[in-house]
Amino acid sequence: MNVPVIAQLHAAGKRYGTVTALSQVDLAVHRGEVLALLGPNGAGKTTAIALLCGLRHADSGRSELFGMDPRERTARSRLGVMLQSTDLPDALTVAEQVRQFSGYYPRPRALDETLGLCGLTAQADRRYGQLSGGQKRRVQFALAVCGRPDLLIVDEPTTGLDVEARTAFWRVLRQLVDEGVGMLLTTHYLEEADALADRVVLLNGGRVIAEGTPDTIKQRAGCALVRCRTLLSAELLQTWPDVQRVRGVGRRLELATTAPERLVGALLAADAALTDLEVQRNSLDDAMLQLTREAA
């Protein structure tokens, strides 16, 4: 069964003066999935979000939100957005902030439901300016979900949260997705994208350089890291067919590979003095760095 596309960019391009922010970018968010939009600073993530939210208009190609122009009120009423930084009135209480935002939507959650979902029940009567950084992020999230959005865009959502709060936040995001909400996630915590995302789109220099599941992205950059202390030189190992890249200084080396078992066997056969052998599955962080370097 085909899952509906609820937001997409099609061959989208955007320039700011002489700077190309996006070039021929295609991406789609489906109902009930998490799409992680990743890339280094300046890759084009913020511009892509702005096009999908209707805050900017594409110079070429098009952006769609629920099959409509993202600037249409009907489309935006089904959208919830949590941006990386948001200015809210310090004097209003948490409950007042949520109640005010809820009034913008046709079918908002009850106030108590929103506060409970976001872990803010105890802070309902506290003024926004009195909250900690992590509590402020929860309020910003509450404003994004209070209208029961069909699409949720969360930009660096767990910045400022401790490990326990971040884990609780992940549970809420997954609950919403299980209820059918589509989600576009940007984050610099790549373990967060690995844990939550169904698909990843990797941007660099305004272009899509990789797309697929987190496992697919990691496999493209080498599915494992082999670390060891060896008498074999990095220059020699770089010529081996199963070695994608070599890092390290002196005898302590790290090798990326898609065939870790075969590589380990070859290392043991070629170097009887091999020590400190360790095999680790490639992380999404490693994969993003490798693919970005290759694209550059």
Image: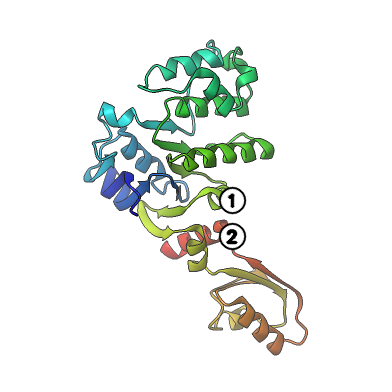
Q: Nearer the viewer, residue 111 or 39?
A: 111
Question: 233 above or below 141?
Answer: below
Furthest residue in direction front, as rendered? 1
Q: Which of 221 and 21 is in front in this view?
A: 221
For badge 2, the amino acid type reads Ser
Q: Nearer the viewer, residue 219 or 243?
A: 219
User: Residue 191's mark?
Assistant: 1
Q: Which mark is first along the chain, 2 or 1?
A: 1
Crowd band around label 2 with a 10 angstrom C-alpha radius: few (<14), some (14–19), many (20+): many
Judge from the rendering whether residue 234 lies leftward or rightward of residue 201; answer left or right.
right
Contact? badges 1 and 2 (CB < 8 Å): yes
Instruction: Answer with the quarter of the image where residue 69 lies.
Output: top left
Question: x%, y% of residue 125?
Answer: 60, 12
Residue at point 32%, 48% (across, down)? 22
Q: Report which residue position mark 2 lands on.
A: 283
Q: Quadrant of the C terminus?
A: bottom left
Mark 1 vs mark 2, CA separation in Å = 8 Å
Q: In which quarter of the image is the N terminus?
A: bottom left
Tally the numbered discs.
2
Question: 293 above or below 86?
Answer: below
